[in-house]
Image (cartoon, rainbow, N blue to C red):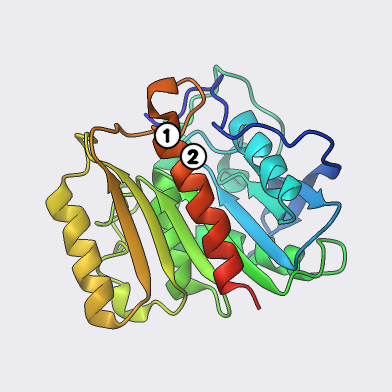
Amino acid sequence: MCHDIDAHPPVRPIAGAAVDSEDLVLTSADGTRFAAFAARAARPGGAGMVVLPDVRGLFPFYEELALRFAENGIHSVAFDYFGRTGGVAKRGADFEFMPHVRQTKAELIADDVRACVDYLRSPEGGACTSVFTVGFCFGGSNSWLQSANVAGLAGAIGFYGRPGPSFADGSPGPTARAGEMKAPILGFMGGADQGIPETEVQGYRDALAAAGVPNEVITYEGAPHSFFDRMQTQYQEQSDDAWRRILAFVAANSA
């Protein structure tokens, strides 16, 4: 499990920051309609961010995170994976997400990401000139994969994603596809994450280096899976460091 339904990002709102937000329904390449949440910066810097949630799909944690990006001048869209099987309506804490997760396919998630990227590049989405992805757990792995899937992506960021094959459909994971990646990679891992051993993380670093992909994959010693959470107050220092690194990564890789 990744973030609880009542979790919040460990990033405090910027006092006085003005953002515009709305629920969206976007359309993927196969005609599927899927839910999304857009947050637009009042003072944009040209960058856009696609937020890939954990296995629960779109819920308030990721909507709030999109707002925090917008407060920092980054237009953002958080989206839901389950348009094909679960529709576009808002969902509560009792939503049984795993049956839907098992029906996802990496190639269709990539199509949905492309629809989000197209939206951010459009005038309605902010006419972003540099678009990034960020994801968590299941979304972390899929965010990294967009470095291979989405043309012109400026960078791909992942929190505690599994570098190996996707558990949803068994398709090749980030390590196996490192040679196809074009956009720089940023990663944040927990040293106490029992589900992702450091040997697997180091294998990912090695594959990226061998492929010549600019990357920084950081392991926070002692931090668990899902440490980037306001409820995990003992890991606030690590969360603050990750947030600073994300903003710096966006600034460094924006056109």
Disc 2 element? helix
- 218 up-or-down from 228: above or below: below
Whether residue 19 is visible, yes or no, is: yes
Looking at the image, residue 241 lies above or below residue 56? below
Q: How crowded is mark 2: few (under 14 residues within 10 Å), some or many (20 or more)?
A: some
Check disc 2 and report the residue beneath it: 240
Question: Which label belongs to residue 166?
Answer: none
Q: Is mark 1 on a helix, strand or loop?
A: helix
- Give the number of the disc on residue 237: 1
| Residue 242 in the image, given as x and y percentages of width and height | 45, 46
Residue at position x 74%, y 49% in the image: 70
- Mark 1 belongs to which amino acid? Glu
Q: In which quarter of the image is residue 123?
A: bottom right
Can you see residue 105? no
* Furthest residue toward left: 199
Please state, as top left, top right, bottom left or bottom right, where the N terminus lies in the image. top left
Q: Which residue is drawn at 22% across and 72% down?
A: 207
